[in-house]
Image (cartoon, rainbow, N blue to C red):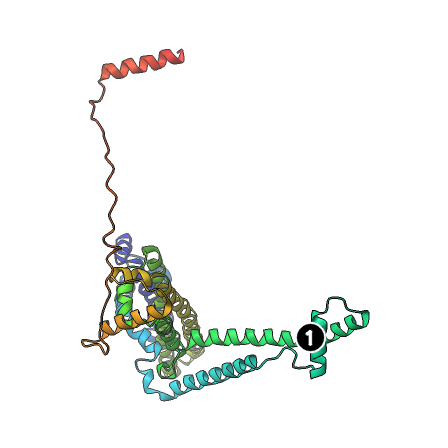
Amino acid sequence: MDNVLRSLEKMGSNFLVGAIVPSLSFVLLVIMLFQPAVSPTVEFNINHLLDAASERFWFAVVFSVLLGFTLSSLNTFFIKTFEGYILLHRLPSLRRAQIKRFRYLRRKHQRIEKSINRFDEAANLTSDEKQKWLYLLYKEDRTPEEQQEYERLSKMVERKQQKLEMLLDQEYRLASHLDSYFPHHEGYILPTRFGNILRAAETYPSTRYGIDAVPVWPRLIYVIPLKYYEMIEHSWNQLSFLVNCAVLSGLFTLLSLIILGWTRLIKPDLTQNYLIAFGVSLTATFIFYRAAQLLVMTYGNMIRSAYDLFRSQLLVQLNQKLPDDLDEERDTWTTISDFFNRVSPVRPVNFIYDYRELTKKQPEPREIKFTLQRAPGRAARRSKAARISHHRGD
């Protein structure tokens, strides 16, 4: 058993967390729940299954490792399927639903923006009341009657200001939701919410800095500090774990449905058990998928932050002059992205190279002087010990 664990550890924690743990759980659940229906004559014993000397134990371990390798190899395929690039793109109704949701939120955001732009904090007042309120607002010495009238008008204005704050809050939350859950343009929308969250993170550097994320990301990862990159990897491993769990839960749901039909014909007394297993596995599939949606948001935010924090270091590595403002930076990144994507760029590429960071004079190494001395002999060590003893007064 220890040799098996050590061999799996050499494969890396990514493989263990993202593939082996879901695979092993799936295999154990299949053996425990489906054996009574498939092999009713064989008595099931959990202790025998966990015995390292039994054939069932090694079958479960080997099958779990093979299934883990399969999940790890197909992880990109599963994630692309969840995004909607594969299989689900053949269901146009899914994409239409996402576009409909996007248009609804965008129209709502535009209505709120228009309300804010034409907002007047004194709109509830008549022209005479508005002039009077402005007059009393800047008047220093008010009479008691004027103070009472000013407070009455100010309360009306305050209610209007509260409405403005509410509109600003709604506009901010809606704009943040659109930016996090949808790409900036309708043409980039995918059939699933999972895919649109990732697509929004992929288009973020383009809308902010003019960076095409697809060709730039493989180059950016080499300037990201190791600690931050490990955080991205950890987030990706968690996402892979949830995606694999969702896939295996869906597979378990399908197996439960098949066994449910089998037991209704062969062994009706087990039908209720597999009906419960079907409902639980279907619920687990939905929970894992929703959890993956929440985690893909965290992963997407880390990708956005990587471009925010380390894009300048990549410019230095590309020997490019650091831009003076955002407009110049967008032009620089647009040119670089075009250079990466095309053999013959649309507009001429005229890089301005800056080698100052690479040609900075390195400090001279400090000179360290040392001498080698022979270790003291036994007689010298005895003499030193005697001096220490005499000093202590022993």
Q: Quadrant of residue 56?
A: bottom left
Residue at 33% across, 13% down: 387
Near-viewer residue (16 or 240): 240
Q: Is residue 190 above or below residue 284?
A: below
| Residue 301 locus on image (x, y percent) | 40, 67
Question: Does the rendering let one see residue 155?
Answer: no
Q: Identity of the amino acid at label 1?
A: Leu
Is residue 60 in view?
yes
Report the residue at 33% width, 69% height from top.
328
Q: How many marks?
A: 1
- Location of mark 1 (residue): 134
Horizontal relation, residue 56 to residue 143: left or right: left
Q: Position of residue 14 (x, y in %)?
A: 31, 61
What is the residue that sits farthest to the right in this orientation?
144
Q: Residue 379's spot in the image, x, y percent?
A: 23, 14
The residue closer to the viewer here, 1 or 142, is 142
Image quarter where the C terminus lies is top left
Q: Which quadrant holds residue 332?
A: bottom left
Q: Is residue 113 left or right of residue 266?
A: right
Quadrant housing residue 280: bottom left
Q: Position of residue 307 (x, y in %)?
A: 35, 65
- Residue 84 shown left or right of residue 148 in the figure: left
What secondary structure is marked by label 1?
helix
Up the image or down, 385 lies above or below 38; here it is: above
Q: Please name whichever residue, 355 or 386, is drawn nearer the observer in this view of the structure.
A: 355
- Residue drawn 22% across and 18% down? 377
Which quadrant: the N terminus? bottom left
- Are there few (<14), some (14-19), or many (20+) residues within 10 Å of tag 1? some
